[in-house]
Image (cartoon, grey):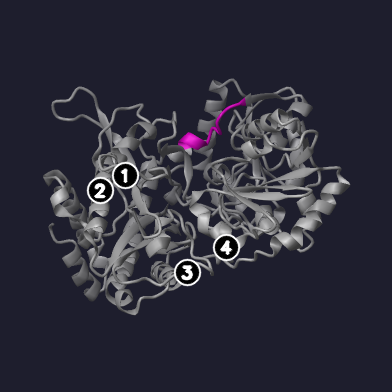
């Protein structure tokens, strides 16, 4: 069932909770405390029991950080949450700063001699290294804390989630857990390691072919695992989450243990070479392994790339999920164009409408993230989230940007469409068409093996660059297979990234344009990397992308004169595929509407 998310805001959290935290800080002789958004599993989306930043400050965004000092405090949020953080956080209690400017830069100005606490379970070694360097530059120091002052002060802390851990059948995963563990074991041997410690819920879900419900918007179980080079493993879960069918599903080569047994199991790795990811696993694991006498091999989570490169069963599952989701989204776009443009509903009502169409598929397990609906000026905030103080109604003559997705057993979806409410202006049509041109360029590109998303990013930006325009977010993120909607290591962005794009990797294609204070435009589809194939007359086989998302574009926003013949042919072919594939799943009135939307340009 779809989980609900508490979107209420309470700026009074700071005034109520900061004194409690500071009292516990004083008991440990701390002058400050780092409050990362991430939890013990480095999750992006958190169970309520682990959302320490939200409890301290009231800020519920999926990316942020905080610092509490004895006499001041700060909250850092990225550009997606500019409006939300101001609505949720009391500026009298917290300085509100950009996450892009960084916690490290703030620490570099910490009072000389101050001692700032950090919970080693919440920071990866990679993240911690830059924070320690910044504190040392200021003449301050970071001190590990146990217990975390927030955990002690949080008297009404929710219980840890106890969603049952269930099998994810091979008809969805396309490969048995035993086969996956054999592959990971071979990779460990090749890297000179004897075992690996896995702490990322996505890797545990993928490797053991299980799913859970501990993390909102992602079907993930919270736990840890130790995997040996021979393919045997220990999986550590709270026994209350272990279903009757789970031991048999895991098989004899996987031993189930409780989370309380994990420290001793780590200690037992003494003298062994143990691989662990310094970007994904918390510093506590490194400290424990080194104290036990293990040789730590720092390397990327060995499940990350195999998980990202989907097998044919997963790719086909994603395609079917997108057909189903495309029918729901097309019904929603029809509703916007016929009902909403007359009744002018609020953003909240728009979100509820889209979620309702997805639920009517009968196969929605959850949303893949909280649905974004930005009307007019709110659409100019790339990842705006409707919260009480900022909710708007759509207006004639403006634009509506809606970004949402679903979690289905066979795939995860994420799609953005921008719609004109009434007749669009020429400026809106120009900007939309330039975004579309960049989107098409990235959809049709062919590229050789070894190409990274970083190398492709400029293709999506070029039509806007030529007009002196740009957007400040990445162009594409990886997406899981009934896992997280944001999945690495693949991505498409200006930021350098060494991960080549491999067959089966699913990425978003989402260029945008945002006119601050007026409206925003984004076109997002998911696409999968195809196997390399020869090009007639060419010398090297080339990868490409196959589009997965099937939802029509708003043809009123397309300036056909700005499109080349090849670009017009792409739009016509894309709409033709939607009509042929999604059309039969739609009721008659929606089919008739889609035929008009999908007519050749």
Asked if the magenta segment contains residue 108, the reply would be no
State whether residue 209 is above or below residue 385.
Answer: above
Q: What is the magenta range? A: 298-306
Task: Please tell me which of labels 3 and 1 falls first in the chain.
Answer: 3
Residue 391 image label:
3
Residue 501 in sight here:
no
Mark sitting earlier along the chain (2/1): 2
Q: Is mark 1 on a helix, strand or loop?
A: loop
Q: Distance between the residues labelled 4 and 3?
A: 11 Å
Q: Residues within 10 Å of mark 2 (few under 14, many from 20)?
A: many
Circle 4 residue: 87
Identify the secondary structure beneath mark 2. helix
Q: Characterize the local packing of mark 4: few (<14), some (14-19) or many (20 or more) Cα atoms within 10 angstroms.
A: some
The structure residue drawn at horizontal position 74% and vertical position 27%, both measured from the top left corner, is: 290
Disc number at residue 469?
Answer: 1
> Which of disc 2 and disc 3 is earlier in sequence?
3
Which of the two discs, 4 and 3, labels the residue nearer the N terminus?
Answer: 4
Q: Which of marks 2 and 1 is in front?
A: 1
**Left or right of 588: which side holds 494?**
right
């Amino acid at each position: 069932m779809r989980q609900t998310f508490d979107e209420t805001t309470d700026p009074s959290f700071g005034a109520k909770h900061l004194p409690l935290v500071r009292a516990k800080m004083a008991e440990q002789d701390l002058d400050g405390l780092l409050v990362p958004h991430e939890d013990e599993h480095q999750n992006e989306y958190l169970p309520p029991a682990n959302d320490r930043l939200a409890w301290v400050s009231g800020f519920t965004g999926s990316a942020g950080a905080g610092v509490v000092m004895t006499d001041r405090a700060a909250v850092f949020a990225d550009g997606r949450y500019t409006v939300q953080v101001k609505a949720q956080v009391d500026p009298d209690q917290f300085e509100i700063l950009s996450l892009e400017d960084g916690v490290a830069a703030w620490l570099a100005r910490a009072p000389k001699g101050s001692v700032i606490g950090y919970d080693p379970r919440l920071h990866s070694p990679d993240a911690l290294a830059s924070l320690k360097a910044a504190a040392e530059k200021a003449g301050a120091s970071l001190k590990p804390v146990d217990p975390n002052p927030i955990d002690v002060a949080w008297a009404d802390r929710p219980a840890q989630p106890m969603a049952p851990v269930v099998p994810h059948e091979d008809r969805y995963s396309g490969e048995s857990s035993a086969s996956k563990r054999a592959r990971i074991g071979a990779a460990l041997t090749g890297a000179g390691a004897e075992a690996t410690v896995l702490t990322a819920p996505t890797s545990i879900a993928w490797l053991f072919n299980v799913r859970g419900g501990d993390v909102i918007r992602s079907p993930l179980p919270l736990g840890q695992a130790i995997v040996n080079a021979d393919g045997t493993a220990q999986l550590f879960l709270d026994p209350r989450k272990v279903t009757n069918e789970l031991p048999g599903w895991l098989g004899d080569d996987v031993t189930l243990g409780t989370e309380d047994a994990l420290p001793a199991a780590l200690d037992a790795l003494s003298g062994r070479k143990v691989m662990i990811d310094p970007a994904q696993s918390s510093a506590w694991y490194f400290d424990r392994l080194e104290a036990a006498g293990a040789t730590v091999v720092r390397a990327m989570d060995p499940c990350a790339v195999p998980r990202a490169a989907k097998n044919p069963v997963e790719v086909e599952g994603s395609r079917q999920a997108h057909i189903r989701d495309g029918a729901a989204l097309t019904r929603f776009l029809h509703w916007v164009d016929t009902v909403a443009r007359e009744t002018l509903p609020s953003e909240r009502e728009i979100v509820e409408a889209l979620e309702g169409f997805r639920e009517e598929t009968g196969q929605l397990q959850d949303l893949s993230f909280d649905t974004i609906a930005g009307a007019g000026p709110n659409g100019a905030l790339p990842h705006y989230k409707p919260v009480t103080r900022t909710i708007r109604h759509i207006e004639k003559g403006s634009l509506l940007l809606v970004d949402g997705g679903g979690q289905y057993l066979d795939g995860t979806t994420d799609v953005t469409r921008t719609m004109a409410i009434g007749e669009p202006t020429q400026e809106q049509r120009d900007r939309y068409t330039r975004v579309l041109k960049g989107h098409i360029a990235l959809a049709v590109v062919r590229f050789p093996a070894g190409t990274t998303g970083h190398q492709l990013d400029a293709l999506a930006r070029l039509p806007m660059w030529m007009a002196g325009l740009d957007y400040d977010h990445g162009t594409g993120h990886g997406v899981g297979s009934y896992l997280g909607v944001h999945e690495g290591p693949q991505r498409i962005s200006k930021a350098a990234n060494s991960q080549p794009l491999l067959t089966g990797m699913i990425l978003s294609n989402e260029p945008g344009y945002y006119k601050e204070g007026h409206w925003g435009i984004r076109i997002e589809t998911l696409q999968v990397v195809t196997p390399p194939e020869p090009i007639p007359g060419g010398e090297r086989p080339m990868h490409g992308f196959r589009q997965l998302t099937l939802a029509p574009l708003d043809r009123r926003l397309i300036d056909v004169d700005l499109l080349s013949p090849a670009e017009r042919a792409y739009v016509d072919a894309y709409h033709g595929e939607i009509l042929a594939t999604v059309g039969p799943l739609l009721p008659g009135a929606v089919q008739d509407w889609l035929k008009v939307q999908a007519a050749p340009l």
